[in-house]
Image (spheres, rainbow, N blue to C red):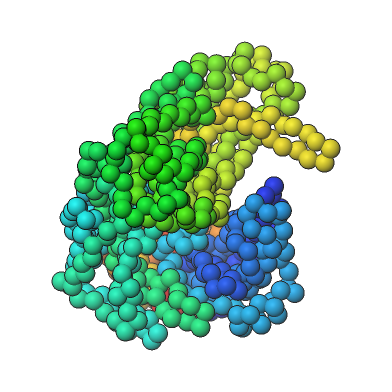
Amino acid sequence: MTPPEIVTFDLDVDLQENHALVALSTEAQDDRGLDRMEISMVSDAGDRRGFTQRCVAELHCAVGFNMVLPRGIWAITVQAFDTSGLASEPATRVAEVIAQLGDPPAAVAHDDLVERFREIVGPLPIDFPFNPGDFWDGMFAPGAPDQGQPEEAQVVGECMQINVDPQEGGVFFTLAITCDQQTDEEGRYIRIEMDREVVNSGGRRISVGDSIWNDPERKSLSAGDEFSWLDENVTCGTQYRYRSRVSDPQVTAHGVSVGNTLASATIMVQTRRCTPGSFADVNLQAEENPAGVRVTWRLIAGASWPENVPPEGLAFTLVRFTPATGELVELEQAVIRPDQVPAGRDYEFIDDQAQCGEQHWYSLSAVSANIPPEERAYAFGFLHSSTASPVLACDADSLGAIDLNVTVSYREFFKVQAEADIPGGFNWPADEEVFLQWVGIQKDHYREACEDPPCSGQWSVIVRIPITEEVRQSGLALRERDASLARRGSLEYRYRLEIAILHRGENTMDYEVVDRTPAVLVTTPPFPPPPPDILRLIATNDCPDGAPRCVSIEWELYEQPGSNNRRPAARIVIERIVGALDTTVFEVALDQTHYVDTAPFERVFELANGDIARVCNHDVLYRMVAYSAEGHRFGASPLEISTPTCDEPWAVVETRRR
């Protein structure tokens, strides 16, 4: 058997208005079928990212995406693996990002950088282990919290349980290990991580783990082990999401790798209510207003401020977070000292940019004013209050009143269908070059690498339709498909319609978005698990029921790793494909490990003179296909044989081990 081959691997640079996108495209091929493509990235500063693209036994598999990388020289390595476990030779390209986000865009991608990278980091390709199950984990910024108010306490975990006790001094939690975990691989150890984020604020996760949990001498955990800790850096009346993870990272010459997830758990925690009369009791509220949304809060006269407030005071920041889009917008910021509010003070902000038809959350936070602005997102807050706003009704003549219907389907790959009917006489802008755009974004995908809010995603234009005079008079029926989704289940995508006006400059073009529909969220269904691997394929004349020839197919059932993206197969079949045209499907039981195909693969032709011609030698492909309960198809383990001529004996054809 020959290993897979990387046939193309290109890096390019797409310069945007204030940043540079490094575009990656690569393709691999294999005569037996590809299982996955692994892509890893490492910078000269030791920053590491990576993900896996599942290829579901395709003979060709391609990956393409854009990414905003921080400044530095980046080595990007691609390696392909087939369904038998053979790996291709790794291929590496190097790109240098010269400017940070917000600077004039500049980046280059060429082979001349390889030697410079070797001088700084070491030889290529970079050995970068990571968890293939976490598709985008660690590559882009963390995703936005889920929409809506969660329950007060919700535990979701595997091999771990989090128990919490909100106290006056903070949140006391205990991590309970519920199954044995160990690592025997040299250079790896057990690490426990814990981070938190404020729910419905769009804020980033902040690591709160204790250093004792990162002991490189620890090689195992046992069921019943417990780790307790008091998180004192929390504010009253705030809802947090705590996440804990056990992994097996590896200490390398370039730092510490991400490691595989061995156990995980998540829990929501509501801290104690704020004491009446404290400065944290701000009574944050959001209500509908003729101009949009009116947000109010109050600093109470004579309120008890924390003792460790610096003389500079506190930096108060009001932000708007939209769960449906992941957009985070800073609305107002002010530095206030305790002596500036001796008689109390009411604050008001009118948000006239809130999108109609969408749920928004408003969050007010306060951190030490002596902390630099670029570090405030990671600092402990003396105050963090969030409240949901009412959903604003959309005007009848705005795009927000148009019903956008988005559906997702899957057979060999995912497709999203968008439908919308815009009537004739709709209130289009009077400008000459007006367009209707259907745009979309994957959750956690293409997020800007910015240090401060706003940190919204970059929406991709799927189709852009010019608004002609005929459209203005007769209307428009949108029926479009997006077939560019990632080959992976259980991912969230957001779509919306926008009205954009094209402004042309002397050497520039800019699309100004003037109206849009609320975002529609769709989730791709989870992939069913791969079927059992075909481990042996034997052609023989010793066949049951007197058949002259047969093919004996044997496999072993194996346990799938626990994952939200895998489900038990509801049906398994074997496909026999003769000459790439004639396909026959054989049903097999889910617990079956052996099947005999008694078809002879002979084609019989009647000649003009009445003679019969037998043709026996054909290329025959066997593959196993699993179907989920929803009917989604997943194929794997293709094996090909060439049958002999009619009078030649059969022989063992192929044996494969995963």
Residue 359 picture location, percent across and down: 40, 32
For residue 213, side relative to residue 580 (left or right): left
Q: How many circles with numbers are drawn on the protein?
A: 0
Q: Nearer the viewer, residue 70 or 433?
A: 70
- Image quarter of the C terminus: bottom left
Residue 498 appears anywhere in the view: yes
Q: Is residue 3 above or below residue 24?
A: below
Q: Residue at x 52, y 69 (%)?
A: 48
Q: Is residue 522 above or below residue 393?
A: below
Residue 640 appears anywhere in the view: no
Q: Nearer the viewer, residue 122 or 328?
A: 328
Q: Nearer the viewer, residue 526 or 533?
A: 526
Residue 221 picture location, percent across and down: 23, 76
Q: Residue at x 38, y 70 (%)?
A: 260
Residue 274 picture location, percent across and down: 24, 42
Q: Residue at x 62, y 40 (%)?
A: 461
Q: Please identify the quarter of the rendering in which residue 186 is found.
A: bottom left
Q: Residue at x 20, y 67 (%)?
A: 228
For residue 167, side relative to residue 606 (left or right): left
Query: Looking at this rendering, what residue extends furthest in the bottom direction?
Result: 186
